[in-house]
Image (cartoon, rainbow, N blue to C red):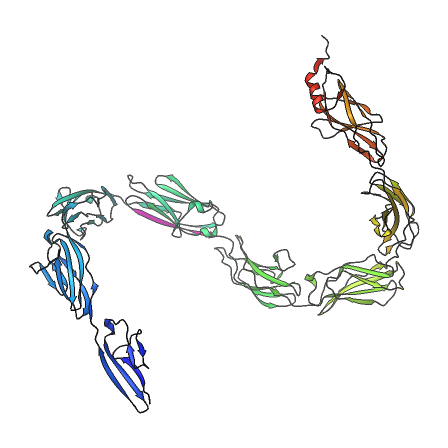
Amino acid sequence: PVPTITWMKVNGYIPSKARLRKSQAMLEIPNVQLDDAGTYECRAENSRGKNSFRGQLQVYTYPHWIEKLNDTHLDSGSPLRWECKATGKPRPTYRWLKNGVPLLPQSRVEMVNGVLMIHKVNQSDAGMYQCLAENKYGAIYASAELKILASAPTFALNQLKKTIIVTKGQEVIVECKPQGSPKPTISWKKGDKAVRENKRIAILPDGSLRIQNASKSDEGKYVCQGENVFGSAEIIASVSVKEPTRIELTPKRTELTVGESIVLNCKAIHDASLEVTFYWTLKGQPIDFEKEGGHFESIRVQASSADLMIRNILLMHAGRYGCRVQTTADSVSDEAELLVRGPPGPPGIVIVEEITESTATLSWGPAADNHSPVSSYNLQARSPFSLGWQTVKTVPEVITGDMESAMAVELNPWVEYEFRVVATNPIGTGDPSTPSRIIRTNEAVPKTAPTNVSGRSGRRHELVIAWEPVSEEFQNGEGFGYIVAFRPNGTRGWKEKMVTSSEASKFIYRDESVPPLTPFEVKVGVYNNKGDGPFSQIVVICSAEGEPSAAPTDVKATSVSVSEILVAWKHIKESLGRPQGFEVGYRKDMEQEEATETVKTRGNESSIILTGLEGNTLYHFTVRAYNGAGYGPPSSEVSASTKKSPPSQAPGNLRWEQQGSQVSLGWEPVRPLANESEVMGYKVFYRQEGHSNSEVIETQKPQAVVPLPDAGVYIIEVRAYSEGGDGTASSQIRVPSYSGGKITSAQSTLHALSASSSSVTLLLALIIPSTSW
């Protein structure tokens, strides 16, 4: 049979890029790399047996760099070591070139396996170097430049502080870092004497001078000198040793109550020549005075003292306060602790453990006492029917601070509640706990009877019983409804009817045999799925009276104006039903009865003025009484017409003559149109300019005299009036009035009233005082 062929790589894995071809008889490796080299084995196997064959894959490649050269800067006299590494097969060999010329071994120059070493380089060694790696398949080059640095020492880049200030007992390090090539040798002098190293004084490897446990004897000028073959340089620094700064922060430990204030005083004892700066911290963090809402204020009392004012302290302000004093020589700090007593924190999670019809057993986690023991807990509840959170009665009645459970009592059945707990201590009452989950108390028989049971108006033979519905809060369960019981006054047995709607507020009992105004005893009870609840108090109400049986009499209609008619009638003296009011129906002469509009009155009114009617129009009117049982018969129909419209023509050709404190007016009579009411007279409206209220003079003639009692300008207009009302106004005129003088016109004393003529008259008028000379 055809064998199954598999491939493997001895001591390795076949590359993932390899592909099998020709029924796996051929293994193809694309883009062969060095790590693909090795021994590969082909295995063939079928039911008759198996066989294998191994072949060696050798990979040859030109050199590749593993490590290249980098440009190098060295001080004169320093050693150089360059290494270039390449891979390839066969393994590459190395050669070195300098400035393009093969580099030969010398006493200072060694070349071994790609490593170039030059001992103590000098200026002659500077140049471009190349490393050549080659095998029989190719060669590669790597280049780098060697620069030799040679310069005299200088301190240009590393200047020392001119004066170094430390305090007694501190460690001081005076740096000395000259630049130069080769690296300068460093020496130290104090004044003109060389510095001698001892247990306290040492010259560090980088050339810096370290003085431990500084004392006054260490004060002075220190000279650092750097020297090499190209020259030398020096730098001078002064060391000043001061007394160490001390600090006093008071008070050290204080207990406060929320809302109180305190001042922390930080005093520094320091060398008089040093300036001090104060820094304040709370719980290790700097106090941000601008973001603390005015609670903190830093006050600098003296140069060596600072106060921290804490106003209206809060619980969050408790903790360790730090004062740090910073000078140019040292930094010292001290701490003080503030304990803040306050109302308790919120109690822990509230758990509802047991529920009944009217109780709920609760437990909670203790509240943080904030340094004042919790004296008591209060339970609060909220339901859809409460105004926010309300304190509930509990068992025990007083919940002491060491308790973590209690029972809420006198809850309403079948109501959703959520609970929370509030802790109190001698300082005050804290924030409430997180509300509990919402629970619903168990169902119970209703205990609240309806209130305000009374009778209502109805139709003949009806008994209308009304009541105030019981709030959902007091229904105590599902399936809530009402039991309406009633009986004729003086009888024994009750007739009961069920009303299944919990929102119902009345019940109507109809019996054709019940006469109007028959007294009944009634009561209303409640029930739900748990059973029947109590009934209300018994009240006596009457069955509905009948609708009015008589029509109003002596109905009259009188025209009032162009849009108003007065309708009046006499009350009904005898009727089976007492009227609650009257309904007036009215329609135009040419309209059908279906177009009748109505207006209602209430109580004992016996007239009404209908408004908004059309002018010069005939209307027909009827009146009928009504009550809760219905409407009585209508009265006989009466009629009346609205008055004609007032004249639409305005008074024209208005003329005036002004003398002293009055003005004489005249105008052309108004002629009404055929459909307008006759002119009964004229109304003259006048007012001072700038005033809103007008005075009115009535006259039957087309003329009038108008008084102008005060100096100033008067606005005047004229209207015709009739029984239909006031007509259209004339154009307004402006007339001047002058007290103590008269106006003599240079023109005719009668003037057509236009704006231009009156203004001309004013310009030409002469004021003649009334006082004689």
Q: Position of residue 314 (x, y in %)?
A: 48, 50
Give the residue furthest to the front. 22
Prevalent SS, magenta region: strand
Q: Residue 163, relative to residue 734: is it above or below? A: below
Q: Is residue 138 magenta?
A: no
Residue, x 85% and y 53% (percent of image)? 627
How far from the left and from the top, in percent, is residue 101?
11, 57
Up the image or down, 205 lies above or below 417; here it is above
Image location (x, y in percent) of residue 539: 82, 59
Residue 10 horizontal side relative to residue 134, left or right: right
As drawn, is 292 to the left or to the right of 76?
right
Residue 294 seen in the current view: yes
Q: For the image shown, how many numbered marks are present on the structure?
A: 0
Q: Which residues are magenta?
A: 326-345
Q: Please tell me whether residue 528 is drawn above or below residue 182 in the rendered image.
A: below
Q: Is residue 220 visible?
A: no
Residue at position x 85%, y 68% in the image = 493
- Which quadrant: the C terminus? top right
- Quadrant of image for the N terminus: bottom left
Considering every residue shown, the one lying at the far top of the view is: 773
Place of residue 298 in the rendered image (x, y in percent of width and height, measured from the top left): 41, 43
Horizontal side, residue 763 vs residue 235: left or right: right
Q: Nearer the viewer, residue 558 or 508?
A: 558
The part of the image, by quadrant, that contains residue 674 is: top right
Question: In the figure, is residue 263 to the left or right of 520?
Answer: left
Q: Nearer the viewer, residue 609 or 105?
A: 105
